[in-house]
Image (cartoon, rainbow, N blue to C red):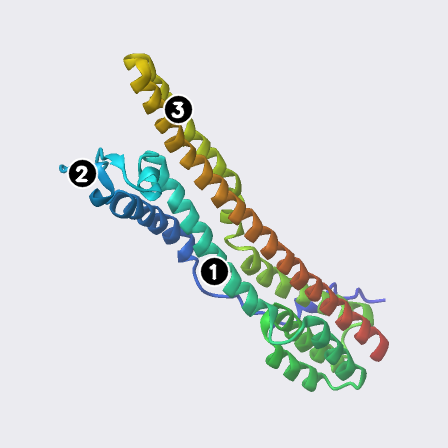
Amino acid sequence: MAETKPNAAAKASSSTKTQGGGNAISYLAPIVCIIAGYAVWRFILGNPDGFSKPDDLGGFWPAHKGPLGAWNKMYEGGIIVPLLIGFFFMVVVFSIERFLTIRKATGTAPNSDFVRKVQFELANKNVDAAIALCDKQKGSVGNVMKAGLKKYKEMISSGEFSTDQKVAAIQKEVEEATALELPMLQKNLVFLSTLTSLGTLVALLGTVLGMIKSFSSLGEEGGSGAAAELAAGISEALYNTALGIGTSSVALMMYNVFTTKIDSITYGIDESGFTLTQSFVSQYK
């Protein structure tokens, strides 16, 4: 008996297409956010009008004294504050970017309803109508299903392979399409997961630096005046902690929201692959 060919996908060209597009936001957003954080700290929180003793010389880090409001007190938290503000901006930027991407990847209708409609069309051997549903659905599940359906349609008319080989070819096509979709869904989530812990650690660093500065002042000057300055310094240092914890909390919340949505889409992709293979086996033995 002649040796069978290992896989139908080796003969037929893949219908999946490599997704284009760069990832410039991954490189530009952190830099822009840090610069924006410094600008907020330097020109808004550090507005000379908000201090009783402003530093008229200005410069990179003006030594303003006597903050008149809570926002101005945050300025005296030190040079770590603009970094934390930049982290918060990163959380906002990447949350918006992931929200828009995942919303687009979800498709125009619930994936469970879409898969049921495709199952109905395949049960009636109407593959073209199923492909039309994919064009209407769009999203990651629609893209994977469409790629699988194209291979499904190709295998129907192919008399060169066995049923098992045809099913394997459909499965491979689904896997290739899935491999293109999943990185797009998970891209940039690493920034949110990193900021979850990094925000707290950097805030702690700012707090420790502020405490060192305050106690050094107490040791050098002594007296009740130094004690008052110590209390003010501790209050200023804790602004770092509050800002860092707030940033980390938002990052953690958004990360969990997006991973939950991605898991739902991934389940829909797995369901679509199972639907195609089971339908082919039952319809075209």
The answer to whether residue 285 shows anywhere in this view is no
Residue 111 lies, with reference to residue 201, above or below; the image says below
In space, the residues marked 2 and 1 are separated at their CA atoms by 34 Å
Residue holding disc 1: 96
Q: Is residue 61 above or below residue 30?
A: above
Q: Residue furthest left?
A: 57
Q: Residue drawn at (36%, 18%), measured in percent from left and top? A: 215
Question: Which type of secondary structure does the marked residue at label 3 adopt?
Answer: helix
Which is in the foreground here, disc 2 or disc 1?
A: 2
**What separation in Å lies between label 2 and label 3 (alpha carbons)?**
24 Å
* Amino acid bearing label 1: Ile
**Disc 1: CA contacts within 10 A as few (<14), some (14-19) or many (>=20):** few
Q: Residue 40 or 161: which is nearer the viewer?
A: 40
User: Type of residue at label 3?
Assistant: Met
Q: Secondary structure at mark 1?
A: helix
Do tag 2 and tag 1 residues touch (Cβ < 8 Å)? no
For image coordinates 62% across by 77% down, the residue present is: 137
